[in-house]
């Protein structure tokens, strides 16, 4: 979109200021993340650029914070916990959220608006309030599971955090899957039924492949929500369920170690890889739907 | 008689009613019985209940009252996927993520038919619609007509005895529609399938069907073979809906046997055949087809009544001439004449005498 030759002075000014504004928005979004990356290679235990770093002196840089992350048992525990909790919570969110979205897209369901509002509420209610509620709810649940069912304390702790994170992830799945279902042609399920496929076969063979892009994006959001989450896990979990964000949080509060910056850099790289993979998957699935040629 | 009819019926609707909201009946007291192998079309304007009937037969809607039977068995409580009915949808409803062959193979896989059997059946079904070369394509890579052919093949591939078609040609252009109309009827008759076809296109209904059920207001207005429907409409809705029609309003003057005289609103008298009018003095709408109007007095009965008509417009349509006249205050009276060497081409402003055989002019409800 170039500037047309008949543009007035006002239009010209707006045209350029619009670009400046867009640039500024990008800058404010990206800069805080980008700044972290070189700092994570700091040879000193500081959160600032040292004179050596500014001079681009190799002595000013090191990988020692990465090494700390990979060897420190605290960080390793946090990493392991995150990798246990986030995927399981994501699977639960995706299964329940997808089913809920499909159910809510049926025309005969009563009180659709109310049900939707309740399911979406974890996204809207301030997190600290959800977290407080969850604290009481899951401590009772946890006590019951430990005393009545006689389950191991550590296991119960994981169950609590995973369930709490699944609840937080469900709204994202519902929203993305609902959006995909809007474009879903209902006569396809009718056609499948007509050809003799029962509801379960129809779901897995016809509906699921077609709404997969929405399910994948929803799952990604749910994963990131759990992977990023610090408030709820602080309330619901105990020290043995410490996740990466939790460890970063106490790291900032108690020791201000640039290891946090190294972890942040790793997480950014992982996020970029994840997003790219999902986007490629989504495009492939869209091509399969015949949306675009190829 | 009734018992014999029940024995022979393959598809049967008995006193079926349907209401979506519990108040308004979309389908009111539907009774219909189809023998095996028949091609029946449900024809009607939108909102007349024809698609609802099809959906009830397919199992996507449940009847509020009444009984639907397939081969003598009530299917009210059988879910759609256990009815074994083939269906072609208006928007094709092909699975976009599967190739043509996978689409056709789907109903066979669901039925747990072996792989080699499946492939053979798929290729045979594709052969029926001349689409073998497209087995590996995806639906999005096909044109509308090709997609509809695949949808048809998919509805036939598992050899159902009953196939439902919901306005399958609605989205296609005229020429394709005509080709496919022919293909569908040929396939249906060759395979001996019972077909229920829903359309709002009367040409389609007339050219394809063994019988046509004309729907309006949730009821079947007339159920008859195409020729009877066109030539002997039983009420004024059917007369208006099927084909082109000239209508004149009047009052029954006298009835003798199967002819009657009607006094039109401008005072002139015409001959007609009473259909669903019974009493002298009753208000009536007479209906006459444009091609049955005569301008040549020698071809009418000597005592036939004629009307003065002023030519308003003459349209040359190639095979026929279409002349618009003002008759008894009606400006839209149309006559159609064949383009024969001796046919007169009327010029606007001319006044002619027109008449008709009493049996061609039907006195119907007003």
Image: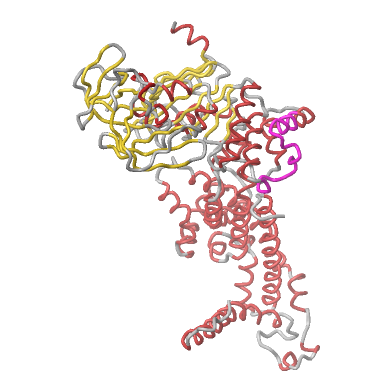
Q: Quadrant of residue B359?
A: top left
Of the pair B84 and A199, the residue shown nearer to us: B84
Residue A170 x, y percent position in the rendering: 54, 54
Magenta segment, which residues? B121-142
Position of B355 relative to B46 (above/below): above
Q: In the rendered image, is residue B12 in sight?
A: yes
Q: Main secondary structure of the magenta part?
A: helix
Residue A166 within the segment the image draws in magenta: no
- Which residue is nearer to you in this view: A159 or B316? B316
Count of all numbered marks drawn on residues in the image: 0
Give the left or right position of residue A113, taking residue A65 as reference. Answer: left
Left or right for B183, reference B212: right
Quadrant of the image for the N terminus of chain A? bottom right
Q: Quadrant of residue B357?
A: top left
Residue A289 in percent (x, y) is at 65, 49
Up the image or down, A292 lies above or below B116; here it is below
Side of A60 where B155 appears, left or right: left
Q: Position of residue A253 (x, y in %)?
A: 59, 77
Residue at the spot 70% in from the left edge and 84% down from the top edge: A45
- Which residue appears at 42% of the width and 23% of the height? B231
Query: In this figure, which colouring scheme has been used for the structure?
Result: secondary structure
Picture coordinates of residue A196 (x, y %)? 62, 30
Tell me if residue B138 is in the magenta stretch.
yes
Identify the image quadrant of the C terminus of chain A: bottom right
Residue A204 can be seen in this image: no
Q: Is residue B106 left or right of residue B61?
A: right
């Amino acid at each position: 979109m170039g500037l047309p030759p008949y543009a007035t002075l006002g239009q010209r000014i707006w045209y350029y200021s619009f670009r400046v504004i867009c640039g500024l928005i990008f800058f404010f979004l990206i800069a805080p993340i980008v700044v972290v990356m070189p700092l994570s290679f700091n040879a000193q235990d500081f959160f600032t650029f040292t004179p050596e770093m500014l001079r681009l002196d190799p002595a000013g840089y090191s990988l020692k914070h990465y090494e700390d992350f990979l060897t420190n048992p605290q960080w390793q525990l946090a990493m392991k916990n995150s990798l246990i909790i986030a995927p399981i919570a994501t699977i639960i969110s995706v299964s329940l959220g997808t089913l809920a979205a499909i159910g809510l897209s049926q025309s005969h369901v009563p009180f659709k608006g109310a049900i939707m509002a309740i399911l979406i509420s974890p996204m809207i209610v301030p997190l600290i309030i959800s977290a407080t509620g969850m604290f009481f709810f899951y401590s009772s649940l946890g006590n019951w599971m430990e005393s009545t069912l006689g389950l191991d304390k550590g296991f119960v702790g994981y169950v609590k955090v995973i369930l709490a994170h699944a609840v937080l992830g469900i709204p994202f799945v519902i929203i993305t899957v609902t959006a995909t279902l809007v474009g879903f042609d209902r006569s396809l399920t009718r056609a499948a039924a007509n050809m003799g496929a029962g509801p379960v076969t129809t779901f897995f063979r016809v509906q699921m492949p077609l709404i997969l892009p929405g399910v994948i994006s929803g799952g990604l959001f749910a994963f990131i929500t759990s992977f990023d989450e610090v408030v709820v896990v602080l309330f619901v979990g105990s020290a043995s369920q410490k996740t990466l964000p939790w460890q970063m949080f106490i790291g900032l509060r108690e020791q201000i170690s640039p290891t946090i910056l190294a972890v942040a850099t790793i997480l950014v790289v992982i996020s970029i890889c994840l997003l790219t993979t999902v986007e490629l998957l989504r495009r492939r699935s869209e091509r399969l739907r015949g949306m675009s040629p190829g | 008689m009734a018992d014999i009819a029940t024995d022979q019926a393959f598809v049967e609707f008995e006193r079926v009613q349907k209401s979506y909201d519990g108040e308004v009946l979309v389908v009111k007291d539907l009774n219909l019985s189809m023998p095996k192998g028949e091609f029946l079309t449900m024809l009607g304007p939108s909102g007349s209940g024809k698609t609802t009937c099809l959906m009830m037969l397919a199992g996507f809607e449940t009847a509020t009252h009444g009984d639907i039977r397939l081969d003598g068995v009530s299917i009210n409580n059988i879910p759609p996927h256990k009815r074994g009915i083939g269906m072609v949808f208006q928007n094709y409803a092909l699975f976009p993520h599967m190739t043509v062959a996978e689409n056709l193979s789907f109903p066979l896989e669901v039925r747990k038919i072996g792989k080699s059997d499946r492939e053979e059946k798929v290729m045979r079904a594709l052969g029926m619609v001349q689409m073998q070369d497209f087995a590996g394509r995806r639906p999005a890579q096909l044109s509308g007509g090709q997609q509809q052919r695949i949808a048809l093949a998919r509805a036939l591939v598992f050899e159902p005895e009953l196939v439902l078609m919901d306005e399958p040609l609605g989205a296609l252009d005229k020429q394709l529609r005509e080709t496919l109309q022919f293909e569908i009827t040929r396939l249906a008759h060759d395979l001996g399938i019972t077909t229920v076809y829903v359309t709002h296109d009367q040409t389609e209904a007339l050219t394809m069907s063994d019988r046509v059920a004309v729907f309006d207001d949730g009821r079947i207005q007339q159920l008859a073979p195409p020729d009877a429907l066109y030539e002997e409409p039983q009420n004024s809705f059917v007369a208006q809906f099927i084909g082109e029609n000239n209508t004149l309003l009047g009052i029954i003057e006298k009835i003798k046997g199967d002819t009657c005289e009607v006094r039109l609103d401008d005072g002139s008298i015409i001959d007609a055949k009473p259909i669903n009018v019974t009493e002298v003095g009753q208000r009536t709408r007479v209906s006459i087809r444009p091609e049955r109007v005569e301008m040549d007095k020698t071809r009418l009965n000597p005592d036939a009544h004629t009307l003065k008509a002023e030519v308003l417009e003459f349209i040359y349509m190639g095979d026929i001439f279409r002349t618009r006249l003002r008759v008894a205050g009606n400006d839209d009276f149309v006559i159609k004449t064949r383009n024969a060497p001796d046919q007169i081409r009327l010029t606007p402003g001319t006044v002619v005498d027109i008449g008709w055989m009493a049996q061609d002019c039907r006195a119907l409800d007003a």
